[in-house]
Amino acid sequence: MQKNSSNKVIPPHQVSHRLDRLARPYLIWLYLLALVPVLVMFFLMFVDSEGLSLGGMEPTITNFTILTEKSTLIAFINSLKFSIITTVICIFFAMLIAYSLYKSKIKNKYLILLLLILPMWTNFLLRINALASVFNKENILSSILGFSFPSIIGTDFAIILGMVFTYLPFMVLPIYTSLEKIDPLLHEAALDLGLTETKKFWKVILPLASKGIVSGSIMVLLPCMSGFAIPKILGDGNILLIGNVIEQKFINMNYNQGAILAIVILIIILGAILIINKVDKEGETLI
């Protein structure tokens, strides 16, 4: 129940109706900018056309041969490899950061988290290009220290480092959120039962933080798999990920095959969302 300015009680169904009306503009934009493009891509999967021209458009299933091409398979394998490696590294460092912050006696812990996510407020491409300038042979660090470092641009290490730098906050926040929800009495109970700090972490803390780990892993894994900017800039185009293949298809106006690969990525994303809903039904650990 709510009360308006004249102290009249507003029934809950009327409050819900008013909120629904406020959400309508958002739903309209959601349908226009998300659902309509997906439907267009789904349509392009089953036709043969030049660009988006309707002239000479014919139904076909030959576009699906892109899924068996060697370059596509290599791109999928590379995407899976880099995303898994990045996710594992992010879990390790995010757990260290989140648990250290959780155990610390800092009063305003959320200020530390704010400092952690502050770089995310800047433009994504600016951050990646800034990393690229640091990874080059002649950079600001070599100017300060007086000697040059070997360039790592175009290597696997540069891509993994760029992905970890970019997506680590997506892992820290859900893990820290799950740690904050642990009942402090469980710590005392674990110690009273004879567990050491190390055993308490592995047998109590880590299982209770699993929701955050799963949510964070998916939020790191998916953008690593589908992104194209990091491998293009830090990999210098030497390493092909599935996001780069999709980008090339759309740049070359091969929308039919590009749409197929984009729909495959979309299916993977939807599957990941279902996993999150199963693991964390209340959405407690999501950013």
Image (spheres, rainbow, N blue to C red):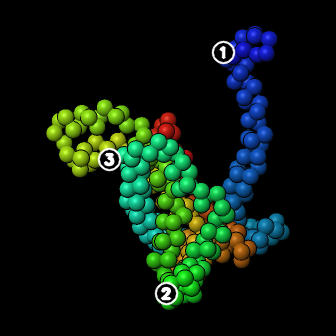
Residue plotted at (32% across, 44% down): 205
Q: Which of marks 3 and 2 is nearer the N terminus?
A: 2
Side of 274 relative to 8 (left or right): left
- Image height of 3 relative to 233, above or below: above
Classify 147 as above or below 121: below
Question: 75 or 129: nearer the eye?
Answer: 129
Q: Quadrant of residue 255?
A: bottom right
> How many marks are shown on the rendered structure?
3
SS of the residue under disc 1: loop
Please give the residue where the numbered disc 3 appears in the rendered image: 206
Residue drawn at x 50%, y 77% is 158
The answer to which of 57 and 118 lies nearer the viewer is 118
* Left or right, residue 227 beside residue 18: left
Query: Which of the numbered marks, if any, corresponds to residue 149?
Result: 2
Q: Which of marks 1 and 2 is in front?
A: 2
Give me the C-alpha separation between circle 1 and circle 3: 40 Å
CA neighbours of label 3 inside 10 A, class few (<14), some (14 to 19), many (20+): some
Amino acid type at circle 1 is: Met
For the question of whether residue 276 can be seen, the reply is: no
Q: Callout 2, which amino acid? A: Phe
Residue ID at (23%, 37%): 190
Numbered disc 3: secondary structure: helix
Crowding around mark 1 (Cα neighbors within 10 Å: few <14, some 14 to 19, many 20+) is few
Q: Tell me the element at label 2.
A: loop
Residue type highlighted by circle 3: Leu
Name the residue tied to disc 1. 1
- Mark 1 or mark 3: whose residue is earlier in sequence: 1
Q: Does residue 30 show up?
A: yes
